[in-house]
Amino acid sequence: MTFKSKFFTLEFLKWQSKQYSYYTVTFLKMYTLLYGLWKYLFQKDEYFVLILGLDNAGKTTFLEQTKTKFSKNYKGLNPAKITTTVGLNIGRIDMHGVRLNFWDLGGQEDLQVLWDKYYAECHAVVYIIDSSDIDRLQESKEAFDKMITNPSLVGVPLLLVANKQDIPKCLTVGRIKEVFRESKHLIGRRDCHVLAVSALHGDGVHEGIEWVVHRVRRNTLRPPKKNGDS
Ligand SMILES: Nc1nc2c(ncn2[C@@H]2O[C@H](COP(=O)(O)OP(=O)(O)OP(=O)(O)O)[C@@H](O)[C@H]2O)c(=O)[nH]1
Ligand SMILES: [Mg+2]
């Protein structure tokens, strides 16, 4: 090879490698741009909702009704087949362009110590009260007080579900409000709402979930996660 042809080959190789790096950078820029657009258009805001309350209050029944009402093709578990929760039940629904993830924890006394592990990550709490269990109303209020005193729940909307309203002679919503109003100073400025529900029959479940969605979306203290966020 002559000196001239060697020179031209070298120049050509340099030019070619410049072209390659130009295409690589352009490709990466396009990829980043398109991925950002895809994320913006298709990824939903995600919120995490804790379902808490004493054992037997109806938390898992409430979750099953929620999944049945808001998920296409989901046939809820037979209520008779729902047993006490020892670990965690999860559920997920999409509505109003957002995703709600539910964590339903066991309510037995020795399992309540696990509740606070989820506080920092949650965007709302649905607290279930058994309106037919007059003897344990005070115990439920104490568990509620302990929960809302935890600083990791500051600013989190609270939905109090007065469940089992289908049972004759159960406590009225008015009575339950009266009792839980004593915790007003602990609730502070958090959004809080008490709702009459029969999780077994599904009454009030839709309204409750609508309330939660609206409150978590407007709560600037706990921004949503984008799905895909770790
Ligand atoms: N009548 C009536 N029974 C209900 C209602 N909701 C739940 N139950 C019943 O209450 C019992 C307990 O319900 P669960 O959903 O398992 O209660 P839980 O709060 O998840 O209990 P743990 O998992 O032990 O903390 C079951 O027999 C349910 O069928 C309701 O609205 N009305
Ligand atoms: Mg349960």
Image: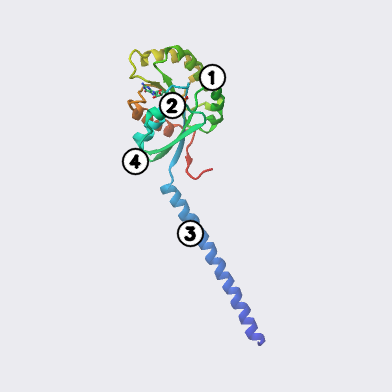
- Quarter of the image for residue 9 reads bottom right
Residue where numbered disc 3 is placed: 30
- Quarter of the image for residue 101 reads top left
Q: Nearer the viewer, residue 191 or 111?
A: 111
Q: Nearer the viewer, residue 188 or 72?
A: 72
Residue where numbered disc 1 is placed: 146
Q: Earlier in the sequence, mark 2 or mark 1?
A: 2
Residue where numbered disc 2 is placed: 59
Gap in Å between the C-alphas at discs 4 and 3? Answer: 38 Å
Gap in Å between the C-alphas at discs 4 and 2? Answer: 22 Å
Q: Amino acid at mark 2?
A: Lys
Q: Earlier in the sequence, mark 4 or mark 2?
A: 2
Q: Position of residue 187 (x, y in %)?
A: 48, 20
Tell us which disc is closer to us: 2 or 3: 2
Secondary structure beneath label 3: helix
Q: Amino acid at mark 1?
A: Lys
Q: Residue at x 35, y 19 (%)?
A: 165
Badge 2 local density, few (<14 within 10 Å), some, or many (20+)? Answer: many
